[in-house]
Image (cartoon, rainbow, N blue to C red):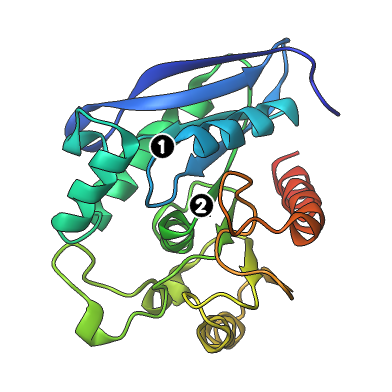
Amino acid sequence: MAYEGMIAETLRVHGHNDELIDTYGARPLGAGPFPGVLVVHHMPGCDEWTREVVRRMAQHGFNAVAPDLHFRQGPGTPTEKANRVREMGGQIDELVIADLGGGEAYLRELPTSNGKVGLIGFCSGGRVAYMASAKMPSLQCAVDCWGGNVTSPPAKLSDNQPVAPIDMTADIAMPLLGIFGNDDKNPARDQVDQTEAALKEHGKDYQFHRFDGAGHAFLNWEADRYCPAPARDAWPKIYAFFEKHLG
């Protein structure tokens, strides 16, 4: 069902160490109850496309929020803050999970919540989605959209990101959906194969969809890499997954 009315606004949630985090949220008008979706932005930050994804989730009947995981590098535009994150060696996993926990708590506390929350992440946010499926067991499900560096070798690990998400696979506690383009370089096909093998080895509940003719960020209609045909196929799979596991 598409909801004709929604409220969309910038708000704040409590994250790591109870810090107030700038967050973009949208929710359908009406009494609900509605499921919640936590949107994890890509490395370019909580930009216009991310905000549109949040509104799209609300149009499909979900309360949705996207915490700005780069807010500590502000003030500035999403691009400026993203550049500062890159300069400091990438996002800090411990802070990211804590900040997302604040977004999850906000969604659960909304008076229109049905008590269920899922998560979707794109690019670096897809990596976070895989990690969150192991580190945030109170979630009902997670969607990894072309998450790069899930299979990071030891040489690429750092103080900010000390453990490769693939090494967390045994702890995954929820259904996981993966959306990938077969022409992507990060993750490349063999990296997706490696992740899928780990999920199979540990008996996890997962679905992977791989799309020919699609590369990185193929759902992003703001980018040159947007691929309309695979995108039209992928979005309904995402909505159906959330509807199945969030009600």
Which x, y percent locates residue 213? 72, 73
**Residue at 30% in and 32% down:** 77
Which x, y percent locates residue 151? 40, 80
Quarter placement of the C terminus: top right
Up the image or down, 89 lies above or below 74; here it is below
Dividing the picture into quadrants, the one containing residue 59 is top right
Which x, y percent locates residue 170? 46, 76
Which x, y percent locates residue 26? 57, 22
**Residue at 33% in and 49% down:** 97
Label 2 vs 1, first from the N-terminus: 1
Q: Is residue 152 left or right of residue 170?
A: left
Q: Residues within 10 Å of mark 2 (few under 14, many from 20)?
A: many
Up the image or down, 168 lies above or below 4; here it is below
Q: Nearer the viewer, mark 2 or mark 1?
A: 1
Up the image or down, 83 lies above or below 50; here it is below
Quarter placement of the N terminus: top right
Specify whether residue 69 is in view. Answer: no
* Whole-number angstrom distance, CA of label 2 to CA of label 1: 12 Å
**Residue at 23% in and 66% down:** 161
Amino acid residing under circle 1:
Cys
The residue most toward the right is 1
User: Pointer 1: what residue?
Assistant: 46
User: Pointer 2: what residue?
Assistant: 121
Q: Is residue 174 left or right of residue 31?
A: left
Q: Helix, strand, or loop for circle 1?
A: loop
Q: Residues within 10 Å of mark 1 (few under 14, many from 20)?
A: many
Q: Helix, strand, or loop for circle 2?
A: strand
Dividing the picture into quadrants, the one containing residue 174 is bottom right
Specify whether residue 23 is in view. Answer: yes
